[in-house]
């Protein structure tokens, strides 16, 4: 039985899985690790951690009795958004950690761009804006703050490009990873932008010259590595791409209008389309499937499940009557479900780590509004679920303003799908029926699907049938009316509170200007 391998290099763990031509998962393994945070707002990782975790996961999968290593016909790598990319020397040895997507150290570079670059032109070329999230600002930081590292750097490689090099010996970058760097990638031309590279004073020769579709092989598996793993030499190593788009593909998004919300530790909502408006504050890149004409446009909240975990740990963590965290969820859900929409007068702004789209503010902060002595823990718990869902709708509304029609239903994947209450809130807030998968749908599966297509085992031009969709919730007219009013208030909160948030932010000293 022919099979393929999908790999996802994540922020906190790496996963590998093996599927057959029907998309059935035969084996899967994962291994965790940590993000290095040497200073506030910094987040970096050395790529050897990813490589070692991947090799361990591959080895464990290939030892599974369901898997014949010689039946594997290809593999593909999905990865976290690697921000700056990995600075490697001429021998492709890392000379500095990768400044990953979470890293916010490039705030001064962001300010420089806003003051010196024609933002209308940058947005028109790249389809993206400017923020310390984007890789091009992190590259600017490396050049300015680590000149010795910059001088050593031969290439800046996204995580999957680096792993692909070690698997195949070939240097290439997929278009989704290149587009997600922002700032220096021409979205219409599907190529690096010489104009913006010159304007930003970034070196063109540090970027791989070979750009490929995510679904294209970059080379064959090296014989020495194949022998050590028991695989066949020269099976295709497929380029892969950014994990958010990969997970969206795994959830069945292959055509314009398909859209998926991934709600785990953070939240990401993405839609397949063919045109963008950078001014709406979303992120766009070529999609990992049919990237020559299709785009993946997404937005996200930095804390989603993390906000729920924070609430449970903070408000239930010292309660001697509470056992494991799962017990707290089970205890809070029934009384929270009995509450009306709005948790009886509460609003929660979920900016516990700053916020990404569409506000793009590293100094944004969270708050509860409307608290009184009447409110109890289950009120606050429901308000947290609602606040994260308002953040989801905030991004979806930005997507709609780009003019791209959305499918009339919303697919949700990730840990949040375990909560029936949360699925109902999402249906009511977004006005859309909510569907989830019975199976675990993640980026590693999306990578495996691309590997399957490259090996001619799977036809992604046909509707995917690798999972079972379940209708979880339909919107209630009464709840819709209430949530529409609350969403309007939610959208007013951040602009009005922004000056106070910035004055309070402990990682940024107060500005001299008075609060207006």
Image (spheres, grey):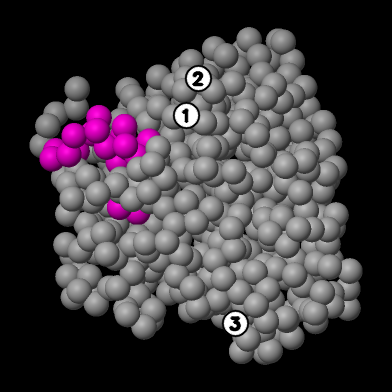
Q: Quadrant of residue 2?
A: bottom right
Q: Residue at x 17, y 70 (%)?
A: 147
Nearer mark to the viewer, of 1 and 2? 1
| Residue identified by numbered label 1 | 275
In the rendered view, does 155 fall on the left or right side of 367? Answer: left
Query: Is residue 365 positioned above or below 516 on the image?
Result: below
- Point out residue 310 in the picture as x, y percentages from the top left corner: 55, 49
Q: Residue at x 46, y 64 (%)?
A: 172
| Residue identified by numbered label 2 | 403
- Point out residue 416 in the picture as x, y percentages from the top left corner: 68, 43
Magenta span has 329?
no
Residue 120, visible in the rendered structure: yes
Query: Is residue 364 positioned above or below 445 on the image?
Result: above
| Residue 335 numbered mark, or none | none
Local crowd at mark 1 within 10 Å, few (<14), some, or many (≥20)?
some
Magenta span has 128?
yes
| Residue 222 numbered mark, or none | 3
Query: Is residue 331 positioned above or below 471 on the image?
Result: below
Question: Helix, strand or loop at disc 1?
Answer: loop
In the picture, the quarter occupied by the N terminus is bottom right
Q: Which residues are magenta?
A: 114-136
- Point out residue 159 in the picture as x, y percentages from the top left corner: 47, 65
Reading the chain from its start, which is encountered first: label 3 or label 1?
3
In the rendered view, does 155 fall on the left or right side of 487? Answer: left
- Could you tell me if the residues under marks 1 and 2 are in contact, i.e. CB atoms within 8 Å? yes
């Amino acid at each position: 039985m022919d099979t393929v391998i999908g790999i996802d290099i994540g922020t906190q763990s790496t996963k590998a899985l093996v599927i057959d031509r029907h998309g059935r998962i035969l084996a899967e393994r994962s291994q965790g690790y940590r993000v290095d945070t040497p200073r506030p707002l910094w987040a970096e990782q050395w790529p050897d951690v990813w490589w070692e975790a991947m090799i361990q996961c591959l080895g464990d999968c290939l030892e599974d009795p369901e898997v014949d290593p010689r039946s594997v016909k290809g593999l593909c790598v999905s990865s976290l958004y690697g921000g700056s990319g990995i600075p490697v020397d001429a021998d492709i040895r890392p000379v500095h950690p990768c400044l990953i997507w979470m890293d916010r150290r490039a705030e001064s570079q962001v300010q420089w761009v806003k003051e010196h670059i024609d933002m209308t032109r940058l947005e028109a070329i790249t389809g993206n804006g400017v923020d310390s999230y984007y890789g091009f600002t992190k590259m600017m930081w490396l050049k300015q703050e680590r000149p010795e590292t910059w001088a050593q750097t031969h290439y800046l490689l996204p995580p999957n490009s680096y792993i692909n090099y070690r698997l195949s010996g070939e240097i290439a970058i997929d278009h989704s990873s290149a587009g997600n760097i922002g700032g220096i990638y021409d979205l219409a031309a599907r190529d690096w932008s010489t104009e913006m590279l010159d304007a930003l004073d970034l070196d063109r020769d540090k970027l791989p010259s070979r750009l490929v579709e995510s679904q294209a092989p970059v080379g064959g598996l090296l014989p020495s590595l194949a022998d050590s793993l028991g695989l066949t030499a020269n099976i295709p190593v497929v380029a892969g791409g950014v994990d958010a788009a990969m997970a969206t593909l795994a959830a069945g998004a292959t055509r314009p209008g398909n859209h998926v919300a991934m709600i785990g530790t953070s939240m990401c909502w993405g839609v397949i389309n063919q045109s963008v408006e950078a001014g709406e504050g979303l992120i766009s890149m070529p999609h990992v499937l049919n990237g020559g004409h299709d785009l993946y446009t997404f937005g996200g909240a930095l804390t989603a499940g993390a906000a729920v975990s924070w609430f449970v740990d903070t408000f239930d963590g010292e309660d001697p009557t509470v056992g494991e965290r799962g017990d707290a969820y089970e205890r809070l859900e029934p009384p929270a479900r009995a509450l009306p929409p709005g948790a009886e007068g509460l609003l929660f702004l979920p900016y516990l780590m700053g916020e990404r789209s569409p506000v793009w503010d590293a100094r944004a902060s969270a708050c509860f509004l409307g608290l009184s002595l009447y409110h109890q823990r289950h009120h606050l718990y429901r308000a947290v679920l609602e606040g994260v869902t308002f953040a989801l709708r905030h991004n979806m509304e930005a997507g709609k303003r780009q003019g791209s029609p959305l499918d009339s239903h919303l697919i949700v994947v990730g840990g949040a799908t375990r909560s029936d209450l949360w699925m109902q809130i999402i249906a009511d807030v977004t006005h859309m029926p909510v569907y989830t998968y019975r199976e675990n749908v993640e980026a590693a599966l999306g990578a495996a699907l691309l590997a399957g297509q490259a090996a001619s085992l799977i036809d992604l031009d046909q509707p995917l049938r690798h999972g079972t969709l379940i209708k979880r919730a339909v919107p209630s007219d009464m709840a819709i009316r209430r949530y529409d009013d609350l969403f309007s208030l939610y959208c007013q909160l951040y602009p009005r509170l922004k000056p106070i948030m910035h004055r309070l932010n402990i990682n940024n000293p107060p500005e001299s200007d008075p609060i207006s």
